[in-house]
Image: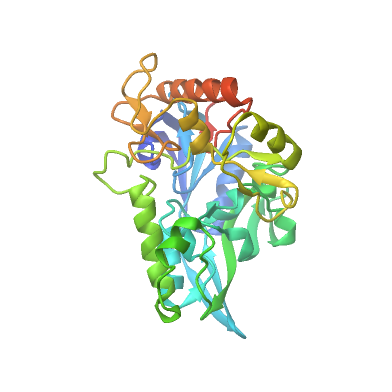
Amino acid sequence: MQENIALAGYTTLDIGGPARWFAEARSEADIVEAVEFARSRNLPLFVLGGGSNLLVADAGFPGLVLHIALRGLRREEDGTDTIFTVAAGEEWDSFVASTVAANCAGVECLSGIPGTVGGTPVQNVGAYGQEVSSTIQRVRALDRTTLQWVEFDNAACEFAYRSSLFNTTARQRYIVSEVTYRLRRGGAPLLTYKDLAQRFSQYETSALTLAAVREAVREIRHRKGMLLVEGDPDCRSAGSFFKNPVLAAAQFAQLAEKFDGIPHYPAGAGTMGAGFVKIPAAWLIEQAGFSKGATVDAVGDTVGISSRHTLALVNRGGATAANLLALRDAIRARVTARFGIVLEQEPVYLSGE
């Protein structure tokens, strides 16, 4: 156990104050020990993965931050599928690279996403037409209320758009230690996302490899400022800061009567399926008057919108959490005033409140 450890360096935003207590778990036994430590001292406990979807308050966190650093990967064949069981602390993009190298389809469009494996089922990570919920077979986690290890099959995880059991009805109850994915060995890459489909539309079928799609996704993410590259002025972000709003078909129809040409897509798999549509939050932000690279005078120039994508809010150097939240609020207010939609923040906000 360490005391008063700065958390900014553990996040991709590089913002935030210290943790009163900090520990790193390299085994399941470490996780149990940390929970018992926090419980015995009546401390709040926060589980930290890659820090890519996290905004830490300027005052820091008054409890215990547990950094998940479990490592390891097991692989087995099952008919035409390959099953990967991966420790929660493994870097997500490195795992995706290994699946592509093994010619296993199912997560190739999720290339370039920062963070660790343990966070993927929590948020039901998705991008470019894929979600991890389509491949997750099992999640192993510690139940913090009983200190028992439990396993969830896919249905029990209650996956929906950017959500699951772990960040909704059972928020903060479970700590993920490993995730099992079932991928299609020799499967074809998924090309439902428009940019990808257009890029490969003239390719012969034999050229549509998983490796080519992974490379294309990473290029697209880099072009949009969603690939965290050290030295890039847009790299200090949490990726998409706002979720794409999901509307009932009737609600969308009313909105479409007022605003022509609103881009929209199916809401995806899970509980938010038929009868719902998804609107790009980036489009709403741009239509509300915010452009790429913009700053807001009332907020200051330490934070701004990425020069490549209006969904990403960027620490331009020396920013505080208060600066970033002020920019968030300015964007939200203008989108709500124009469209009547309240944008939902995607990164977790960690504070003592």
Measuring 66% from the left and 49% from the top, which residue is drawn there? Answer: 267
Tell me if I can see residue 63 in this picture: no
* Residue 313, quarter of picture: top left
Q: Is residue 227 left or right of residue 344?
A: left
Q: Is residue 232 left or right of residue 86?
A: left
| Location of residue 320 in the rendering, given as x and y in whole percent from the top left corner | 38, 24
Q: Nearer the viewer, residue 52 or 262?
A: 262
Measuring 56% from the left and 43% from the top, which residue is drawn there? Answer: 263
Q: Is residue 38 left or right of residue 93?
A: right
Depicted 306 relative to depicted 34: above or below: above
* Farthest-out residue, left: 231
* Residue 210, quarter of picture: bottom left
* Residue 311, quarter of picture: top left
| Location of residue 69 in the rendering, given as x and y in whole percent from the top left corner | 45, 54
Q: How many marks?
A: 0
Measuring 44% from the left and 56% from the top, which residue is drawn there? Answer: 195
Q: Nearer the viewer, residue 259 or 267?
A: 259
Q: Nearer the viewer, residue 307 or 202?
A: 202
Quarter of the picture containing the C terminus is top right
Tell me if I can see residue 37 in this picture: yes
| Location of residue 36 in the rendering, given as x and y in whole percent from the top left corner | 61, 44
Q: What colour scheme does the image use?
A: rainbow
| Location of residue 194 in the rendering, given as x and y in whole percent from the top left corner | 49, 57
Quarter of the picture containing the N terminus is top left
